[in-house]
Amino acid sequence: MKKVLFVCLGNICRSPMAEGIFKQKTREMGLEDIIESDSAGTAAYHIGENPDPRTLDALKKHGISFNHTARRAIKKDADRFDFILAMDSQNYRELQSILPSDFKGLFKMRDFDQEGPGTDVPDPYYGADDGFENVFEILDRSIDEFITKELLRSPS
Ligand code: 4NP
């Protein structure tokens, strides 16, 4: 079983969108029995909430039905997960300070984006609705690359 955690700031926009896309893709690939996923936030503002309605709309537009209850990322996530994917460099730094220093599975989501390697998944929370579609497209291609180039190549 391989376990993947997606992390953003509030756990209501980018990371639940990533989790919804990832679950759909791994289901379509018949991998749902060997891969588990979750998402979390580095901040506490939205704990217990469902994803932002604009996140759910963007997923629905692409045929993905999904729900999630927001939670905060914790140190113990390093024991539970093989990969922890941060949406931006602020989340990445925050995770570096929470997780044990010998945890080897921390990446930035866009390390896997051939169109903008290493850059941030932009925070769509305060922007216009089309920001969510932009985030969807970034995540869609980055997750494909993560699955084929990292996840499926890692020892089980
Ligand atoms: P997320 O977006 O980190 O992608 O879930 C945000 C959600 C909420 C806030 C900021 C970003 N906020 O400031 O409440």
Image (spheres, grey):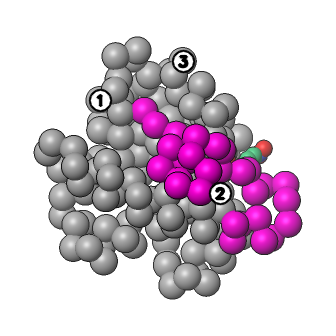
Q: How far apart are marks 2 and 3 (CA)?
A: 22 Å
Q: Is residue 112 part of the magenta span, yes or no?
A: yes
Residue carrying label 1: 79
Q: Is residue 151 left or right of residue 143?
A: left
Instruction: Point out the tag, 2 or 3, that comes first from the N-terminus.
Output: 2
Question: Which numbered dot is residue 107?
Answer: none
Residue 67 or 89: which is nearer the viewer? 89
Question: For mark 3, does the 10 Å Cα neighbourhood hold few (<14), some (14 to 19), or many (20 or more) residues?
Answer: few
Q: Is residue 60 left or right of residue 52?
A: left
Whole-percent x, y for residue 61 in the image: 61, 84
Looking at numbered disc 3 in the image, what kind of residue is underneath it? Ser
Whole-percent x, y for residue 116 in the image: 61, 51
Residue carrying label 3: 97
Q: How far apart are marks 1 and 3 (CA)?
A: 15 Å
Question: For mark 1, does the 10 Å Cα neighbourhood hold few (<14), some (14 to 19), or many (20 or more) residues?
Answer: few
Quarter of image, res 119: top right
Magenta-colored span? 106-134
Looking at numbered disc 1 in the image, what kind of residue is underneath it? Asp
For marks 1 and 3, give the one nearer the viewer. Answer: 3
Q: How far apart are marks 2 and 1 (CA)?
A: 25 Å
Mark 2 CB near ligand 1 (8 Å cut): yes
Tell me the SS state at disc 1.
helix
Mark 1 CB near ligand 1 (8 Å cut): no
